Image (cartoon, rainbow, N blue to C red):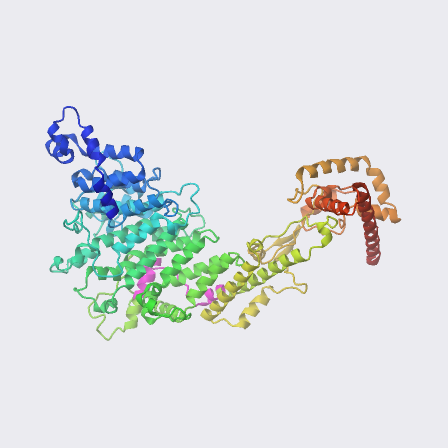
């Protein structure tokens, strides 16, 4: 902040001068020298802040970005809250853009330090949690100003709930709904300045669409992403027990008011669930005894706003409806959205794990525990768990089957591994690859059972529909298998499933959207029921709160999931064989190409190559990576589900994945119908994933096939017209020559008939009918002269001949003579092979 203060001190605010110039002619001159304060007191009906707002709006168009920020710093320091509150909504919208996405604002999602270092530095310093903008927020917060936020821009489930006069479950919305006056339109939330600022900041991730040409910007380098990280580090500190102190002015008091109780009643919406802070304060005799009691509300508000705006786009009822294949998606997250949510989850794990060891256990909780420590304990299960689960379920079921799913996958895996963000992780040696998951994390695994089990089944269903030959898809399978194969994790998951599936004497009541430990007297002290019953109650409460009381749970280590794992293991084996086959084919096509084909004398492959996946473009290195990923993934799956080599071999043989004696893959699985081969569902799956394929070849008229990249388009068209004219003019003589039984007839048939036409196997019944209706006689084809290789070979031959003092005409005669000798030899070999077959 020293930069802004220094610049502001060296420069006299133009707003004060401009306000002086804009004073009406009849305004007393004595008031000109102190317009913001004296005019407001002497003439309140003039609404002096409108001059300030008009000046700021004019400067937003006429002044450069750096100077506008300097002006704003001076305005925030010099003007009182009464006048600043009129410009606050406009300023927030000008920074983060409008809620309808029309106004872009500062475009923080595309602002990068390496592209625009000056603008980036100024924006980050201005919006820093300890910067001028947040100082303005606290200045207004101290005066208890409220700002209207339209309910129509809230996430779908929240908007629908409020419009139906049902109170949302989050305390964030309690006592804030403002009903429209008579004749008014729409519902609004009455938010304090901090809430209003954070609402706009969080929603700008969703409402603002990326500008054209900014699709390849790295999200982690953008100003918005880094600001999210700074806000999380400031308001959810992982070190210390008290949040950083803030002051509105140097040497001034610290404005850290606890949220005041709004005057707008909300009783008609249902019962009011008090926030974590209010619940804590109600049990304390003196709030002032703990400095953090006045600061925790900002942490709780920040987390609730981020979770509500980024995750609460699906309710349990909406999620159940989305299981229908005909359901229409209500909200589709972007990859950038997912990356920001992952940043939030990683920081929340670090925030929750920063509790001291003696504070982790609920049995040690007492009224002496600080609000921040209590908030650390309850942040994830209370505010995040359910909404994140529904968000992940939607992504797993509706995200495209491509490599962009990696962002969702890493977000999920980050949530599943809180031990990666624990303080003791740094003390462990980095060279120890097989670190055992400590029993300390067993409660987390059990209380998030569906995050592990049901989402793992969802990932299996995706993996079975993707091309595992692709290195990116193989990497995703490897990542999931590696995480779940960590020592002791599978045992923890099995223990959690046993706790959920075990019968109970008393069925626990469903904990609606709130996971808490039982509060009945003596639950932790009495010898009956035992501790395992309490753990079973927690697991059941978790499952029922996320899936409903009548959910059908599929055990992760049960027979159904085991069958899916065996199918995945079999497909991994097939993918490894396919990758090796593609690699071998690429090597053969390059090394086995005859030299005469480069000279244009041998027929080129006019059917093209089969591109099953991205291995064809990325080469041998990708084949090696794919093989490594799949090999390790298969090893991890065998460890988790105790699969034996005999089981894998038996499945592979049963599904016909072995290669034939020629080393080529079999045809896709088909059945014979009236019109030929018909693909089965297994055959379609094999083609989609590149496991098997048909040998595709061009079966139409070779003269009419598309012009290739190695041909000159205009020359090919001219040669086609010339050969067509010759064929029409001399059709009869050519047919007579080809019908002769002597050597001349064989020589003409070799050049004037398409080789192998009679022996070509037509796979398509449609092509078979067309071929029957389209008999082809002898004809001359000059298309080979339109090839770049043919012309280059001829030019090379003439150049070599010139080195030996051979002119163009003798060289042409030598080429014709050489080709005649080659054609005679090929004619004799062709006739001999025909006699041999007869």
Residue stretch in magenta: 538-564
Q: Residue at x 28, y 62 (%)?
A: 352
Which residue is at the far right? 742
Side of 315 where 287 appears, left or right? left
Q: Nearer the viewer, residue 2 or 279?
A: 2
Q: Is 224 positioned to the left or the right of 72 in the image?
A: right
Q: Position of residue 66 (x, y in %)?
A: 30, 40
Would you say residue 547 sits in the magenta stretch?
A: yes
Point out the image quarter for the C terminus. bottom right
Q: Is residue 159 visible?
A: no
Question: Relative to the observer, which residue lies in front, 590 or 488?
Answer: 590
* Occupied quadrant, residue 90: top left
In the figure, residue 528 lies in which quadrant? bottom left
Rendered position, 437 above or below 26 = below
Is residue 322 shown left or right of residue 826? Answer: left
Q: Looking at this view, name the residue that lies furthest to the bottom.
A: 527
Q: Could you say where residue 304 lies in the image, as x and y percent from the top left?
A: 27, 52
- Figure disc tally: 0
**Residue 135 on the magenta span:** no
- Nearest to the observer: residue 161 or residue 275: 275
Location of residue 526 (image quadrant) = bottom left
Q: Residue at x 14, y 26 (%)?
A: 27
Residue 481 in percent (x, y) is at 45, 64
Q: Nearer the viewer, residue 363 or 512?
A: 363
Whole-percent x, y for residue 628 in the image: 52, 64
Q: Is residue 837 visible?
A: yes
């Amino acid at each position: 902040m020293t930069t802004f203060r220094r610049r502001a001190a060296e420069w006299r605010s133009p707003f004060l001068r401009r306000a002086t110039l804009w004073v009406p002619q009849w305004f007393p001159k004595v008031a000109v020298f102190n317009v913001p304060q004296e005019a407001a007191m002497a003439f309140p009906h003039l609404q002096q802040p409108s001059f300030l707002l008009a000046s700021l709006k004019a400067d937003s168009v006429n002044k450069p970005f750096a100077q506008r920020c300097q002006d704003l710093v001076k305005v925030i320091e010099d003007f009182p809250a009464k006048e600043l509150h009129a410009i606050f909504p406009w300023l927030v919208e000008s920074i983060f853009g409008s809620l309808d996405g029309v106004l872009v604002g500062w475009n923080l999602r595309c602002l990068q330090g390496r592209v625009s270092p000056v603008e980036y530095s100024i924006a980050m310093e201005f919006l820093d949690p300890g910067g001028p903008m947040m100082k303005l927020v606290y200045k207004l917060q101290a005066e208890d100003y409220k700002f209207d936020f339209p309910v129509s821009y809230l996430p779908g489930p929240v908007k629908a709930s409020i419009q139906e006069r049902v109170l949302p479950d989050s305390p964030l919305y309690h006592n804030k709904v403002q009903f429209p006056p008579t004749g008014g339109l729409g519902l609004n939330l009455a938010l304090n300045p901090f809430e209003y600022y954070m609402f706009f900041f969080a929603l700008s991730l969703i409402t603002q669409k990326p500008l054209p040409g900014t699709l390849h910007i790295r999200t982690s380098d953008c100003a918005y992403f880094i600001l999210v990280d700074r806000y999380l580090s400031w308001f959810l500190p992982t070190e210390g027990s008290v949040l950083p102190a803030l002051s509105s002015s140097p040497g001034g008091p610290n404005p850290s008011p606890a949220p005041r109780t709004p005057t707008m009643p909300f009783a008609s919406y249902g019962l009011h669930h008090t926030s974590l802070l209010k619940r804590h304060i109600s049990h304390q005799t003196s709030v002032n005894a703990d400095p953090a009691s006045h600061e925790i509300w900002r942490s709780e508000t920040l987390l609730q706003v981020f979770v509500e705006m980024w995750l609460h786009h699906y309710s349990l009822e909406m999620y159940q409806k989305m299981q229908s294949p005909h359901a229409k998606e209500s909200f589709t997250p972007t990859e950038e959205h997912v990356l920001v949510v992952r940043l939030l989850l990683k920081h929340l794990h670090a925030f929750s794990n920063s509790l001291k060891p003696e504070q982790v256990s609920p049995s040690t909780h007492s009224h002496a525990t600080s609000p921040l420590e209590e908030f650390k304990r309850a942040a994830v299960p209370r505010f995040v768990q359910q909404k994140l689960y529904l968000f992940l379920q939607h992504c797993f079921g509706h995200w495209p089957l491509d490599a962009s799913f990696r962002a969702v996958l890493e977000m999920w895996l980050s949530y599943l591994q809180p031990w990666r963000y624990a303080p003791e992780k740094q003390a462990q040696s980095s060279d120890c690859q097989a670190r055992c998951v400590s029993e300390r994390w067993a409660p987390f695994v059990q209380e998030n059972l569906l995050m592990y089990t049901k989402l793992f089944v969802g990932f299996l269903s995706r993996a079975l529909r993707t091309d595992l030959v692709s290195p990116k898809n193989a990497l995703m399978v490897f990542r999931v298998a590696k995480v779940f194969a960590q020592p002791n994790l599978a045992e923890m998951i099995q223990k959690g499933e046993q706790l959920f599936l075990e019968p109970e004497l008393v069925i626990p009541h469903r904990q609606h959207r709130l996971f808490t430990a039982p509060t009945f007297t003596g639950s932790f002290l009495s010898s009956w029921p035992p501790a395992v019953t309490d753990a079973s109650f927690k697991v059941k409460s978790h499952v029922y709160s996320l899936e409903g009381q009548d959910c059908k749970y599929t055990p992760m280590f049960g027979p159904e999931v085991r069958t899916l794992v065996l199918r995945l293991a079999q497909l991994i084996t097939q993918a490894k064989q396919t990758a090796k086959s593609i690699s071998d084919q690429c090597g053969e096509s390059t090394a086995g190409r005859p030299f005469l084909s480069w000279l244009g004398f041998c027929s080129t492959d006019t059917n093209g190559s089969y591109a099953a996946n991205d291995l064809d473009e990325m080469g041998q290195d990708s084949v090696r990576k794919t093989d490594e990923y799949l090999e390790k993934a298969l090893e991890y799956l065998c460890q988790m589900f105790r699969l034996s080599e005999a089981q894998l071999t038996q499945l592979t043989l049963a599904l016909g994945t072995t290669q034939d004696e020629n080393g080529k893959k079999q045809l896709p699985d088909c059945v014979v119908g009236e019109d030929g081969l018909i693909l089965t569902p297994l055959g379609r799956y094999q083609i989609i994933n590149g496991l098997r394929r048909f040998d595709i070849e061009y079966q139409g008229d070779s003269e009419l096939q598309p012009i290739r990249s190695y041909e000159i388009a205009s020359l090919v068209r001219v040669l086609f017209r010339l050969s067509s004219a010759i064929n029409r003019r001399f059709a009869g003589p050519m047919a007579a020559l080809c019908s002769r039984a002597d050597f001349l007839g064989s020589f003409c048939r070799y050049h004037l008939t398409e080789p192998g036409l009679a022996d070509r196997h037509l796979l398509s019944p449609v092509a078979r009918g067309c071929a029957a209706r389209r008999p082809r006689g002898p004809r001359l084809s000059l298309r080979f002269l339109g090839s770049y290789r043919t012309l280059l070979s001829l030019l090379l031959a003439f150049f070599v001949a010139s080195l030996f003092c051979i002119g163009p005409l003798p060289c042409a005669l030598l080429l014709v003579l050489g080709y005649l000798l080659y054609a005679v030899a090929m004619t004799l070999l062709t006739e001999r092979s025909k006699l041999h077959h007869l």
